[in-house]
Amino acid sequence: MNDQNKGFQKEEAPKTAQGAQSTTSTWKKLLAKKWVFPATYMAAAAIILTLMWVYQDAGKKTVSEADLGIKVSSSDKATDTTKAPDGAVAVNAQTETIQWPVKDRTLVDVSIPFYDTNATNEVKQTAMIQYNDQLTPHTAIDLKAKDGAAFEVLAALSGKVTAVEQNPVVGSLVEITHSNGLISVYQSLSEVKVAKGAEVKKGDIIAKAGRNEFEKEDGVHLHFEVRQVSDNAAVNPETLLNAKQ
């Protein structure tokens, strides 16, 4: 039995060698073909180019959305839908305009104007306040009812009340700071209805017109002043007031 197995193994060994030789011979014949190497090169080049394209495309997505952070959010998409035909973004929120600090502009007069350095000498003289034998340029406008009666004083703009004081010279005053860089000041008041730190809206009643010592001869009136937050410079209120109010 062992001798038979040995004979079988001896017969199979040449077959295995012959198969290997046959396979080697087939590859040699294939590689001997002139078109094999160019075809292999082109296939490899195509695979490399495909991998490079995929890599570059993935890199672009990563840079544009993750690294640069310019991915459009849901809120940004909503904004894009409001773009005008020329590509400009439409502004929905309107800037609040300043109003006259009274309910009815037709019922009051400007009794003392703002001192404007570019005005005529006659106008400048009417805008000077005499107090304790001194002349002081008027940095506001005084509003007085045509019938001389007291009237309600309104907030000219929405903002935060940053001062409420009782001054022996200018009387009761209220100061409101607004988000547009302006401060409105109301002097010569009575019956003040707001407190420091309160938030008020445009048109809210904050007090009534009263009297003060600084403009004693003006009787019951409102001293309305507008200043800039940046440098505290006084601004002529009439140049800011909305004429339609």
Image (cartoon, rainbow, N blue to C red):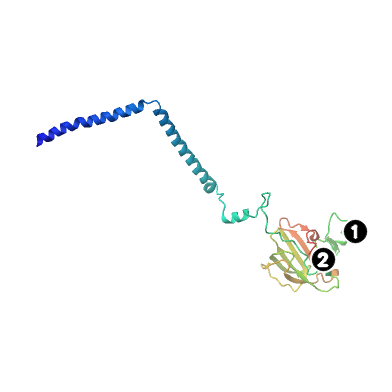
The N terminus lies in which quarter of the figure?
top left
| Label 1: element kind | helix
Identify the mark at residue 99; answer none if there is no mark: none
- Amino acid at circle 2: Asp
Q: Is residue 3 above or below residue 186?
A: above
Crowd class of label 2 (few under 14; some 14 to 19; many from 20; radius 10 Å)? many
Q: In this view, does 38 lie to the left or right of 193?
A: left
Residue at the extreme right: 122
Do labels 1 and 2 touch, CB within 8 Å?
Answer: no
Residue, disc 1? 122
Residue, disc 2? 142
The tally of labels here is 2
x then y, percent, for residue 161 = 69, 66
| Label 2: element kind | strand
From the viewer's side, name the closer residue of 160 and 18: 18
The C terminus lies in which quarter of the figure?
bottom right
x then y, percent, for residue 150 = 81, 73
Q: In which quarter of the image is residue 122?
A: bottom right
Q: In this view, does 157 lie above or below 33?
A: below
Image point (56%, 54%), residue name: 73
- Amino acid at circle 1: Glu
Image point (16%, 33%), residue name: 9
Q: Quadrant of residue 42?
A: top left
From the viewer's side, name the closer residue of 73 and 238: 73
Is residue 123 in sight in this rendering?
A: yes
Is residue 131 in sight in this rendering?
A: no
* Disc nearer the start of the sequence (1/2): 1
From the viewer's side, name the closer residue of 82 and 194: 82
Query: Distance of mark 1 from mark 2, alpha carbons?
Result: 17 Å
Crowd class of label 1 (few under 14; some 14 to 19; many from 20; radius 10 Å)? few
Image point (89%, 56%), residue name: 121
